[in-house]
Amino acid sequence: MINHLKKLLSGKNTIILVPYLWFILLVAIPLSIVLKISLSEMSATSVADMLSWSQGWPTIKINFASYLFLATDPLYIDTYLSSIKYALLTTLICLFVGFPFAYFMARAPKHLQPMLLMLIMLPFWTSFLLRIYAWKTLLVSNGIINNALLSFGVINQPLAMMNNSFSLVLGMVYSYLPFMILPLYANLSKLDVRFLEAAADLGASAFKTFWLVTVPLSKAGIIAGSMLVFIPAVGEYVIPELLGGSDTLMIGRVLWDEFFANNDWPMASAVAVVMMLLILLPISLLNSYQSGQAESKL
Amino acid sequence: MATEPKPNKVKTDLLRVEGVTKVFDGVIKAVDNVSLTVAQAEIFALLGGSGSGKSTLLRLLAGFEKPTKGRIFLAGQDITDLPPYQRPINMMFQSYALFPHLTVWQNIAFGLQRDHMPKAQIAERVESMLKLVQLTSFAQRKPHQLSGGQQQRVALARSLAKQPKLLLLDEPLGALDKKLREKTQVELVGIIEEVGVTCVLVTHDQEEAMTMASTIAVMHEGTILQTGTPDEVYERPNSRQVAEFIGDVNIFEGQIETYAADHVLIRSEACMHFVMHGISGHVGLPVLVAVRPEKVVLSKKRPAGEVNWCSGEVVAVVYFGDHTIYHIQLANAQVIKAQQMNSTTDLAEVIAWGDQVYASWSGLAMVVLVQ
């Protein structure tokens, strides 16, 4: 028995224990609580207990009302769709901006690359909130950009750049661009130049080489970067709150409203659970793709 | 070791390199004023150590680098300024650079598709290439599912698919193990000769150059030291570097003592050398006498005559099975090597460690190099 325990607590297992504990305490338990709340009812101002005792027997009451409401009320469906739309748009723009960025970083002289990497990560040294606020002062009607354009006579009246989808997507692209660039850079810097030379040697122009060799070979980086941008972008709350407008509905704000304005915790939890499922779907697709890749390499 | 050269047809020059120099970063001369011609259907080897400029020269031919000076002509056309994708030249890359995301079939078809060849024709060409390299049943595999030898053949098929005027091989056998290399050498030359393509290959392996090439250019520090057939560069090297780079060699430093019409006597510290074939020089001229180890005969008995032999003590015996290489320390502390075929099993005749032996060679075995 003691030997068995010793075996269980051997070095290898205790190391594994740390991530497992982390996962159970900070992911699995909170998630189960959210799931539980989403299946409960509201009673007055607090969440009703699922478990009740009637005539000495425990009764479990599961309430799907929140989910049903979610599926029938167009507000939620529209919000999910628009969240996905903005997240996709952000991901695409990040990809188109980030790919050349990462490409030239990976092709830059070796001694410059650490510095370029540091420049990419430099924004993280300032608080995320401060940086989003800074965009506000740049974009508002009497902000720096509009004032400059007005004083140079480029425009007659301030451009509407704030509290609309433009400011929202700009803020998201700005915030998430490093998460696209870093995995792409990691991938592209490992890309063997000889593949590009071989393509050129076989008659492919630079453009063809890019589409036929560089892009397919950096697929893993593109997928990783896109996931890192898309997933947090779907649930983004701060950016739509600060830079978005009334017409740029995103699920993070709805979630906030359900929790803190409507005080409807089951509804809020249901919204969160469905959002998570929406995000889990692309992740599991990615996983199956990657394990498929790993298998084909064996 | 070289395969017998084919009966000489009328040779036309296909590739002409004229005074090509490549300078990197403004200072490093990777290739220094190199000129060479490669005849139609010839296998031409650029042989040299690392940093000799052979790879840079190959990259200049492929178009990945632009020469700082000089011109490159292919079949009379100046291709110096053509980008790689417009040159009728294909390259088989070192460690192959097969596209990992494409199948064998797609790899071979890649170049043909870039030329917008009709689909049916592409399929036909790919099939014939697969047949040529005997990989028909592997068409749908990905490169990582193939062995090293198979990958090498795919790379060859891919570089031959477009029927280039010139095929470049960058260390074609470098990624294979020794056993496979010997087999592949023969296969490779067979395929190249079957196709009849002119070929420039780069290698650091003199054996590879000797077995595959009909002409070898020995490169050192960006210049070509000597160009010739394999036996020319082996038997009649024109410099110490060439002699030492290709095969093993014993070098005696000496000077001309007698300069006669029919022979030359050279005195080195170790012995007197009687050379029968003529060299240009004069009495007192310092020269090097080079003798290949396989041309040295070892004996425990003193040879007749006073020239072309020396004596010493065996200080090392390196056994190879079919032959043995003896290291013999001479009186002047110089160590020479002698290679003897192990044609006898009679132990009494076998020369052993510590034996006093006489090393001799014929008057025709020596090459005299004027510094």
Image (cartoon, grey):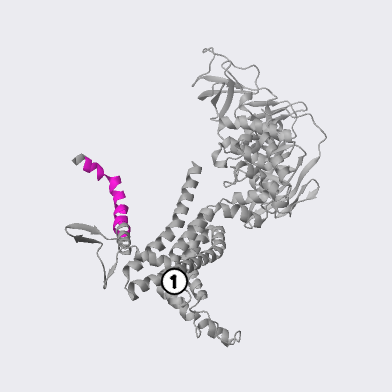
Of A166 and B41, nearer the camera is A166
Q: Is residue A125 left or right of residue A197?
A: left
Of B61 and A280, nearer the camera is A280
Q: Residue B189 sits in which quadrant?
A: top right
Q: Look at the picture and state if B151 lies above or below A144.
A: above
Which residue of the protein is positioned furthest toward the left in this rendering?
A56
| The C terminus of chain B - image quarter | top right
> Where is residue B48 drawn, in percent x and y?
63, 41
Q: Is residue A55 visible?
A: yes
Q: Look at the picture and state if A207 lies above or below A125.
A: above
> Where is residue A287 drawn, in percent x and y?
45, 51
| Secondary-structure class at tag 1 | helix
Q: Is residue A134 magenta?
A: no
Of B85 and A270, nearer the camera is A270
Q: Is residue B252 visible?
A: no
Q: Which residues are magenta?
A: A4-27
> Where is residue A264 drawn, in percent x and y?
32, 71
Which residue of the protein is positioned furthest toward the right in this rendering?
B10
Q: Which residue in the protein does label 1 denote?
A: A75
How many numbered marks have been drawn onto this rendered protein structure? 1
* Magenta stretch secondary structure, dominant: helix
| The N terminus of chain B - image quarter | top right
Q: Is residue B70 left or right of residue A231?
A: right
Q: Residue at left 35%, top 65%? A: A65
> Where is residue A196 drawn, in percent x and y?
62, 52
